[in-house]
Image: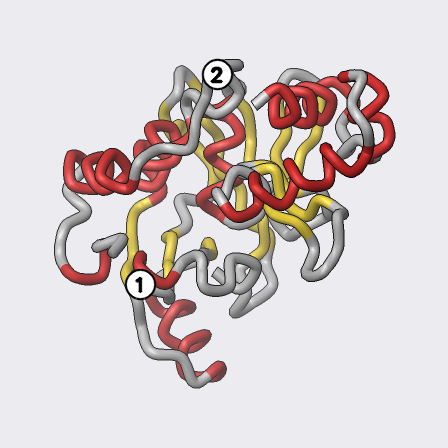
């Protein structure tokens, strides 16, 4: 899960490391996801979240499709 | 969850993961009980231990070890486990700040500023995840 300068840098990095491409997000979309995912993590009553709730977060911000299925 | 809260609370206060013995002493527990709890929390993905050890590697979204994802906020500095976790640290702390990383292709510095909870400046990098979601925890350090 990395930041890269641009799509051009991403493609070169994938090629040089022999990796298949995954999914790309804007930083704004990642920020939305990251905040939703971890907003309650430091609260004393935090509990590991059921997988369905994590999937719902991905779905609600538009990260759907096979790549984003948690199980 | 007392142990989990003690570990996270100590990390956020001190900026480093507490020794297992200190957690046990703080909670009046024996070290074996804390060790068992660490293993259960690891299995529940509530923290990540170094392979085969009782040493904490990740208190997601925080990294206990230095990484290329530095987070600056409220006069303090943290390390995220990845690009996602770096921004998540600001979310978990409910604060604004700056993330600094480097592009793994060209090695140049990348910055992201968060103001009012929104990305508000910096180099506008893209985020890429190679591993499909169902395999994230197969090797969380690689992911």
Quarter of the image for residue A37 reads top left
Kindly check if marks 1 and 2 are in contact, taking CB atoms under 8 A apart as contact. no
Quarter of the image for residue B38 reads top right
Return the chain for callout 1: B
Q: How many residues crowd around disc 2 within 10 Å: few (fewer than 14), some, or many (20 or more)?
A: some
Q: Which residue is denoted by mark 2 in the rendering?
A: B94
Return the chain for callout 2: B
The residue at the point 48 percent across, 43 percent down is B44
Left or right of B57: which side holds B69? left
Residue B2's label in the rendered image is none
Check the picture and name the quadrant holding the N terminus of chain B: top right
The residue at the point 30 percent across, 46 percent down is A26
In the figure, B87 relative to A4: above or below?
A: above
Q: Which residue is denoted by mark 1 in the rendering?
A: B132
The residue at the point 34 percent across, 41 percent down is A30
Q: Position of residue A25 (x, y in %)?
A: 29, 50
Q: How many residues crowd around disc 1 within 10 Å: few (fewer than 14), some, or many (20 or more)?
A: some
Could you tell me how many numbered marks the image carries? 2
Depth check: give the residue in front, A12 or B38: B38
- Give the number of the mark in front: 1 or 2: 1
Left or right of B79: which side holds A5? left
Q: Secondary structure at mark 1?
A: loop
In the figure, B28 relative to B79: above or below?
A: above
Q: Position of residue B54 (x, y in %)?
A: 75, 48
Depth check: give the residue in front, A1 or A38: A38
Colour scheme shown: secondary structure
Depth check: give the residue in front, B40 or B106: B40
Left or right of A4: which side holds B13? right
Q: Secondary structure at mark 2?
A: loop
Q: Position of residue A13 (x, y in %)?
A: 45, 74
Q: CA distance from mark 1 to mark 2?
A: 28 Å
In the figure, B61 relative to B94: above or below?
A: below
């Amino acid at each position: 899960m990395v930041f890269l300068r641009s799509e051009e840098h991403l493609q070169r990095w994938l090629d040089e490391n022999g990796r298949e491409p995954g999914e790309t997000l804007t930083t704004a979309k990642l920020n939305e996801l990251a905040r939703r995912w971890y907003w309650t993590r430091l609260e004393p009553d935090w509990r590991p979240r059921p997988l369905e709730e994590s999937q719902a977060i991905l779905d609600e911000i538009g990260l759907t499709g096979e790549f984003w299925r948690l199980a | 969850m007392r142990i989990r809260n003690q570990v996270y609370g100590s990390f956020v206060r001190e900026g480093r993961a507490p020794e297992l013995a200190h957690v046990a002493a703080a909670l009046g527990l024996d070290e074996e009980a804390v060790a068992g709890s660490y293993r259960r929390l690891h299995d529940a993905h509530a923290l990540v231990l170094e392979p085969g050890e009782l040493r904490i590697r990740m208190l997601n979204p925080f990294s206990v070890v230095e990484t290329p994802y530095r987070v600056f906020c409220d006069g303090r500095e943290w390390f995220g486990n990845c690009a996602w976790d770096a921004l998540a640290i600001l979310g978990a702390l409910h604060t604004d700040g700056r993330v600094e990383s480097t592009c793994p292709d060209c090695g140049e510095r990348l910055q992201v500023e968060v103001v009012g909870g929104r990305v508000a400046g910096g180099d506008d990098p893209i985020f890429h995840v190679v591993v499909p979601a169902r395999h994230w925890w197969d090797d969380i350090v690689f992911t």
